[in-house]
Image (cartoon, grey):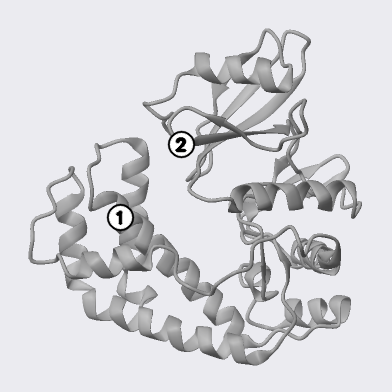
Amino acid sequence: MRTPPDDLTEAELVALLADAWDLRGVEVEHAPVGFGSHHWVATAASGIRRFVTVDRVSDGRLQQALLAARALHDAAGLGWVVGPTPATDGAVLKPLGPGYAVAVYPYVDGRAFPDQPGPRDRELVIDMVAELHAATPGVRELLATADLQVAGRAHLEGALLRLLEPWTGGPFGEPARALLAARADDVRALLQEHGRLADVVRRTGSEWVATHGEVKPDNMLVTAAGLVLVDWDTALLAPAARDLWQVVSADGQERARYASRSGREVAPAELTFYRLDWQLADICEYVRWLGGPHERTADTEIAWASLVANLDPSELL
């Protein structure tokens, strides 16, 4: 997120880092990166640097995902998995403030992965994904299982029923309502197609594997030791396509490479499902946010721009 939460102080965070991770004399600097989680870079008096993530939590899935990431790094030997650094009591998450949870990670020095990766870059990612999926047996019992439902669907369906009422919770409320109203039939069609494709995915009978869920350039860093993958908070047991749809190109070369590395074929319908699932999850989240109480901030401006992009006619069925 671009702005820190207004109901959490850095003093509270510093105190928790000292108490739970034994990071003393810490200075923290908010890092305006990513979207969804809040991040800080913490530098201890000893010179140790850590990357700190703060999330709102509503269930146990985040802890399950981080425990799996830790196991993938330690037990499965996947050194490119940047998993959490446990607290002194072994926990990967610690509660803080009103419904937040804190995780601490190694600070990774590296350069950004290309936004437009070339063929060799894509091969490296495919090989990494195949290695992750092969490690499924060691973490299967740790991970939650994907339900193939649109995250936040009920809220979006509720918003579609409120299109004749003014949305007065903040500066983007009415623009969001007007935009959704103009695209309402298209959004309903997307929801219907998502349900149809979910049934197709369920019928494929393919083995579900340990997935990261967001294998995209801004979650990868090129380090001196090679490519690493960060941000494991959405890890789930799911179809392999969940990790492949953002990597494969139209010519099918990456699908073929994945099949040769994994022995597993991925159906085009599964890739289509996850593209649509991502789009609808974004629409649901931004409608929820902008349809409720909010202020104009760097984050809500990004949310509005993203909603506009997702509801562009070229992106709809």
Residue 89 location, x and y as percent? 76, 28
Circle 1 sits in a helix, a strand or a loop, which is it?
A: helix
Secondary structure of the residue carrying numbered label 2:
loop
Please state which of the two labelled residues, at mark 2 or mark 1, is closer to the viewer: 2
Residue kind at label 1, given as amino acid type: Arg
Where is residue 242 drawn, in percent x and y? 63, 70
CB-based contact (under 8 Å), mark 2 and mark 1: no
Q: Quick check: 32 left or right of 267?
A: left
Q: Residue at x 22, y 75 (%)?
A: 184
Is residue 112 at all visible to an observer of this figure?
Answer: yes
Image coordinates for residue 60, horizontal then vertical, percent:
58, 50
The crowd level at tag 2 (other Cα within 10 Å; few <14, some 14-19, many 20+) is few
Task: Identify the residue at image location x=26%, y=50%.
Answer: 290
Q: Which residue is mark 1?
A: 288
Q: Is residue 145 above or below residue 99?
A: below
For marks 2 and 1, the one nearer the N-term is 2
Given residues 13 and 295, the one toward you in this image is 13
User: What residue is shown with label 2?
Assistant: 99
- Decide: is 3 above or below 144: above
Q: Quadrant of residue 39?
A: top right
In this rendering, would 131 be left or right of 152? Answer: right
- Please give the name of the residue rendered at 72% of the width and 63% of the height, measured from the top-left corner: 118
Q: Is residue 85 above or below residue 268?
A: above
Q: Is residue 259 above or below residue 37?
A: below
Return the mark for residue 277: none
Q: Amino acid at mark 2?
A: Gly
Task: State whether residue 80 appears in this view.
Answer: no
| Viewer-proximal residue among 142 and 83 | 142
Q: Position of residue 167 (x, y in %)?
A: 13, 53
Frontmost residue, 97 versus 279: 97
